[in-house]
Structure formats: C-alpha cells, structure tokens
Image (tube, rainbow, N blue to C red):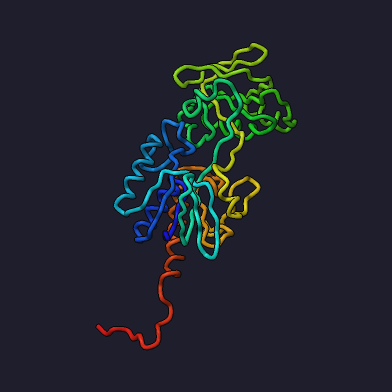
Amino acid sequence: MYDVIIIGGGPAGLNAAMVLGRCRRRVLLFDTGKPRNRWSHSMNGFISRDGINPQEFLELGRAELQKYKVEVVCKLVKTATYSKGHFVVNDDEGTVYTSHKLLLATGLKDKLPNLPGLEELYGKSVHHCQYCDGWESRDKAIAVYGQGRRGVGQSLAMKTWSDSVTLYTDGTNKLTQSDWDKLKLNGIAVCTDKIARLEGEDGKLQRIVLQNGEVQEQQAMFFNTGTKQQCDLGTQLGCEFTSKGVIKTRRLQKSNIPGLFVAGDAARDVQMVIVAAAEGMKAGVAINMELEQLYLKREPQAGNKPVAV
C-alpha cells in the first residue's frame, strides 16, 4: 500500500512527488514519457528555466526525485477505482497497485488542425499558446487558424507580438459584423478560403497554399482548435468536469472524490508549465496534510502515559 500514487510525470506530477518525497511519504509515480509539449524545442515562461528543452527539464526533475526514493514506473495506467477509502490502480500489464491517496496529473491533448504539412512544423513554427511562443514569433507574418469564430480572440491577441496578423477560417464564414469591425479596426486581414496545405523547410513555416491555388507567405501559425483529456481516468473515477472539459477542483486541488486530487492542465484553463508545477506543489501539501490526519494518533490509549524527559 502506497501513501500516494501520482499518475503523470509532467511538471505537476514531478513537483507533487518532490513535496511528498520530502515528507517521507511512500510515493509511486507513473510516467508514459509523452508530455503535451514533447514536440517543442523550448519551454518558455518558467523563471530560471526560460528556453530550456522540455525533455531536459523533465529529466532534471526525475533526477531530483532519486534522493527522496520516489518510485517511478514507466507504464500506462489503464484503470483506476476508488473503493472503501483507498485507490486501486491497474497498469497496462495487469499489475495492481493500491494507495491511500491519488493524484491525477495526466494533462491534456491538443486537437490539431487537419492541415497537410502541419505535423512537420508543429512545435517549431506552428503553436497553440501565444504566451509560450509569442515572443519567438515577434514581428513575423503570423497566421491564426480557427474555423467559425474560434480564431477571433487569438488573432486580436497576436497583435501584441506582431503588426502582421491574418486570420484563416479555413472555408467557414461565421464571423459576425462585430467580429469583422474589430478585426478591421486592428488591421487584421481575414482569409475565409479553404486551406490546401502548409509549406516550409526545417520546421519553419514559409507559406500557406489555398485550395484555389493562391499562395500566401506566412512565417508562423497559432491555432485554437481546443483540447481533450489525455486519458479517461477522471471519468472512470467519477470526477466532475467543467464546461471546458477539465476536471473541476476545489481548494488545494481537491476533486469531488475523497482523497483524489488533480493538478496541471487536466484541472485548469491556465495551461502553463509553471502553473502546473505550482498546482503540483499545492496538491502535495494538501495530500500530506490528509496523510498526517490518517497516521497521527489522536487519543491516548488507556494506561499509555507520556514519557517524562
């Protein structure tokens, strides 16, 4: 029986594991090695680690856990259940693990636009987060992708980093008159034609080819096509979800299930590495406090007097 099982070895899971390891708890961390940002070459906006390779960041975190004797298992968790005050976890090889507390730090997946040529550019010049990669795209010709009205807000936001912003709605035309007015007022071009493909070299976007044969020169693209949960463990456990598809959490990352905590992108809409790490810290502290309540004796047994020193 573990004190806590953590599912997810990203910044939230790693930081929680460190806190709990320092509290001398028996911790088991599951990590499949497939973080959301694995396509990116740099991780930005994390004080003292700005620009670090995401994989290097995770390796540093795992190395720091060794002195706290946190167990790390590189396996996929298939099922998780809550029964009689403890959690039962099964990996993809059928091994069963139990714990008093459970932390989900499983993250989200980005729904990538279905555009030929995008895969070779994703994480290099095609991105989903302006706060993560806007600086690196400053003063470039920036394309924003969003069908219907989904790209309006992001295209307006990208004016913070560049004067050259074009919104691509990819064959849809659902913009309201108010949308058109805001975009025109802020000097944002709009293309409603269907996109045929993206073209570039060495990971750098160079042009967008439309189905009508027109070619438009662009140097970066940001998209807003939504996200989904990395796995269905939250659903299995009976978690409550918000309208945005993330797990609803209370104070200190607590879920609606006793003893179950959620941290990182799976639980919040501010999807930044440094926020995920902070939530992992909060969850770790809260879990340890609950374990203290579990283990500490509250009432002296009959005849058991304190020892005088």
Q: Which of the 4 image quarters holds residue 45? A: top left
Res. 282 in view: no
Horizontally, is 240 left or right of 97 in the view?
Answer: right
Vertical relation: 252 (above or below) 231 = below
Closer to the camera, 99 or 103? 99
Single out the residue that lies furthest toward the bottom.
303
Q: Give coordinates of residue 279: x percent, y percent.
A: 47, 52
Look at the image and tell me in which quarter the N terminus lies: bottom left
| Residue at position x 45%, y 69% in the image | 294
Look at the image and tell me in which quarter the C terminus lies: bottom left
Res. 288 in view: yes
Q: Give coordinates of residue 110: x percent, y percent.
A: 56, 36
Single out the residue that lies furthest toward the top.
213
Closer to the camera, 50 or 36? 36
Q: Give coordinates of residue 125: x percent, y percent.
A: 49, 25
Vertical relation: 78 (above or below) 207 = below
Q: Give coordinates of residue 244: x percent, y percent.
A: 63, 45
Horizontally, is 169 left or right of 308 in the view?
Answer: right
Closer to the camera, 178 or 288? 288
| Residue at position x 47%, y 17% in the image | 201
Q: Which of the 4 image quarters holds residue 192? A: top right
- The number of callouts visible is 0
| Residue at position x 53%, y 53% in the image | 80
Single out the residue that lies furthest toward the left.
309
